[in-house]
Image (spheres, rainbow, N blue to C red):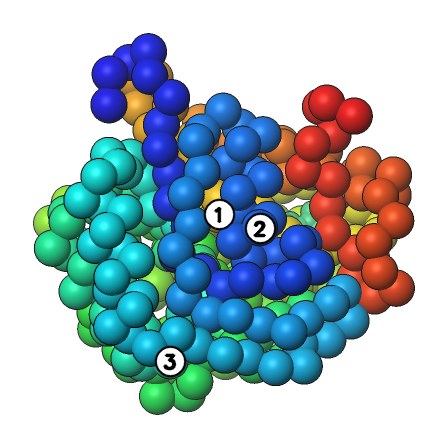
Amino acid sequence: MSASSIPNVVSIAGIDPSGGAGIYADLKAFSALGAYGCGVVAALTAQNTQAVTGVHTPPTDFLRLQIDTLFADVRIDAAKLGMLGTAEIVSTVADRLVHFAAPYVVLDPVMVAKSGDHLLAKNAVAMLREALLPLSFMLTPNLPEAGVLTETRAPETVREMYRCAERLRELLPTVSERWVLLKGGHLPGDELVDLLFDGDQMIEMRAPRIDTKNTHGTGCTLSSAIAALLPRCAGEFKPVETSVRRARDYLLRAIAESGRLDVGKGHGPVHHFHAWY
Ligand SMILES: Nc1ncnc2c1ncn2[C@@H]1O[C@H](COP(=O)(O)OP(=O)(O)OP(=O)(O)O)[C@@H](O)[C@H]1O
Ligand SMILES: [Mg+2]
């Protein structure tokens, strides 16, 4: 990617027809942050702001064809991975990303939706650890997902989050630059804490909790914002920390302005285009 060009970023994830989470939300976040968005469908869901009522996964051959056809033509500068659904899907995605040596893979290990519905098969977790963690530049679990990945109970305090972030970093390769963003959205309290850790520096990022039920897709939006910003910030001082801080600022504004939208009766979406309208 030349310094002046617009990054091409792909989301490999599920479709949420309500547009608050999944690939549709990812494309909105990419676009709002100055990246060109592509999407590879790893799962279809029937979903609204209240519930997931069905999941349909494409045959792995067709998933492979989508990825191969896209990467054969389009230079991809970053990839965000979201809902992958099954062990077969996880292993197919991993195989193709290794093949194409995809840069800046941001893995959001989606397991459970805001509505409480399960989005990842139990036997897929081992495949995710074995095949996807080695090629991920950044891992962005929430607290329950962090518990599953580290095979311990989910952290219940910020102190436990520190220990958990260290354990998560041990699941990523130690030889090269890799980052964990442990999201503290599930802890109670007026202040939310996310931890960014590269194995050396633990960076605490705090923000006041916004009082709203419009948190559908906050995790999808954050990981996509980071994937859009990583290639853009590459030449800057502390590029990864800068990308994550800007992505969080963007998300917080999008949550704060979510009340201007009127979408559904459950956990509504965030306002991705708050800077425009
Ligand atoms: N009410 C809120 N006010 C401010 N920030 C929030 C709020 N809820 C979540 N966040 C922030 O949003 C980001 C996503 O956090 P969260 O822990 O909710 O992720 P998640 O559970 O993966 O989300 P999702 O259910 O969309 O997958 C984090 O940076 C978190 O701090
Ligand atoms: Mg999530």
First of labels 3, 2 by sequence position: 2
Q: Residue at x 48, y 47 (%)?
A: 223
> Viewed as shown, does residue 218 lie left or right of 35?
right
- Compared to 255, does 231 lie above or below? above
Q: Residue, x 48% and y 44% (percent of image)?
A: 224
Residue 61: percent from the left, percent from the top? 24, 72
- As shown in the figure, which amino acid type bears the numbered disc 3? Thr
Q: Nearer the viewer, residue 139 or 86?
A: 86
- Spatial CA distance of label 1 from label 2 is 13 Å
Q: Are marks 3 and 1 in contact (CB under 8 Å)?
A: no
Disc on res. 24 = 2
Hey, what amino acid is under mark 2? Tyr
Q: Which quadrant is home to the C terminus?
A: top right
- Neighbours of disc 2 within 10 Å: few (<14), some (14-19), many (20+): many
- Which residue is under mark 1? 223
Task: Look at discs 1 and 2 and give the one toward the viewer.
Answer: 2
The amino acid type, in three-letter code, at marker 1 is Ser
Q: What SS does tag 2 mark?
A: helix
User: Mark 3 or mark 1: which comes first in sequence?
Assistant: 3
